[in-house]
Image (cartoon, grey):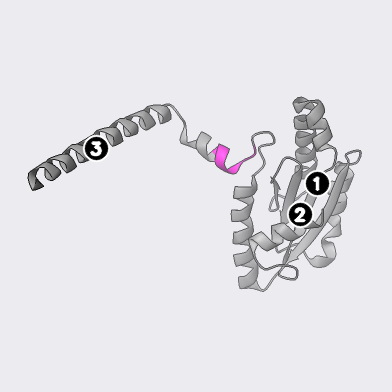
Amino acid sequence: MEYISLEYMFLITSALFVLSFLYNIKQSRMLHGVNPSDILQDTFYDSVTDLPNRNNIEIIITENIKVASRRDKSFCILGLKALDYKDLKNESIEKSNELSIDIADGILSSIRDEDTAARISDDEYVVVFNEYLEVENYDIPMDRISEALKGKNVRYSYVTYPDEASNVDKLLESVLAKL
């Protein structure tokens, strides 16, 4: 009786090994020819605008929190919501993509190189201004962005670290809740 159960366990183990081996071969064939940078691009960047996505901006905000807390500084996060996006998407995906690209271009043309813009959902964007932007100067880039997006139906809000929130999730949650 004991001999049969050992033989049975060997058979099951062998079958699982063969299945695992075949699965790994299939996976390697699926990944063959896929450029690792394409995987990174899809993971951390928006496919329409090429802006960083939510995964990427969470990492950037985490780093900004570390630097700002070490230097006893603050930084600002601007939130933007494209109010016409859903209507345009229902009408035409091309038009909604065009709006997204226009908003991304407007934001990028209005911010400094050291600041980061991201598209975190179809109709929501954030801009992380680094800690060197003093509180009294927050309106300057926001006015430039507003001017660049004139004619677009966009709502704005902003939060500051550490005044309004002290971690990534709370910062993003706060800025988006105000939209």
Q: How far across and how far down the image is residue 111, in percent? A: 77, 49
Nearer-the-camera pick, 83 or 4: 4
Magenta range is 41-46
Q: How far across and how far down the image is residue 153, in percent? A: 88, 41
What is the C-alpha distance between the residues marked 3 and 2? Answer: 49 Å
Q: Residues within 10 Å of mark 1 (few under 14, many from 20)?
A: many
Q: Please, which residue is most extreme toward the front here?
A: 1
Q: Nearer the viewer, mark 1 or mark 3?
A: 3
**Going from the N terminus, do you reach mark 1 or mark 3 first?**
3
Residue receiving disc 2: 176
Residue receiving disc 3: 17
In the rendered structure, which amino acid carries the disc numbered 2? Answer: Leu
Q: Residue 70 in magenta?
A: no
Asked if residue 130 can be seen in this view, the reply is: no
**Going from the N terminus, do you reach mark 1 or mark 2 first?**
1
Residue receiving disc 1: 81
Quadrant of residue 130 within the rendered picture: bottom right
Q: Residues within 10 Å of mark 2 (few under 14, many from 20)?
A: many
Q: Secondary structure at mark 3?
A: helix
Quadrant of residue 86 within the rendered picture: top right
Q: Is residue 11 left or right of residue 36?
A: left
Q: Residues within 10 Å of mark 3 (few under 14, many from 20)?
A: few
In the rendered structure, which amino acid carries the disc numbered 1? Answer: Lys
| Residue at (60% x, 60% y) in the render | 62
| Residue at (75% x, 43% y) in the render | 108
In the rendered structure, which amino acid carries the disc numbered 3? Answer: Phe
Asked if residue 79 can be seen in this view, the reply is: yes
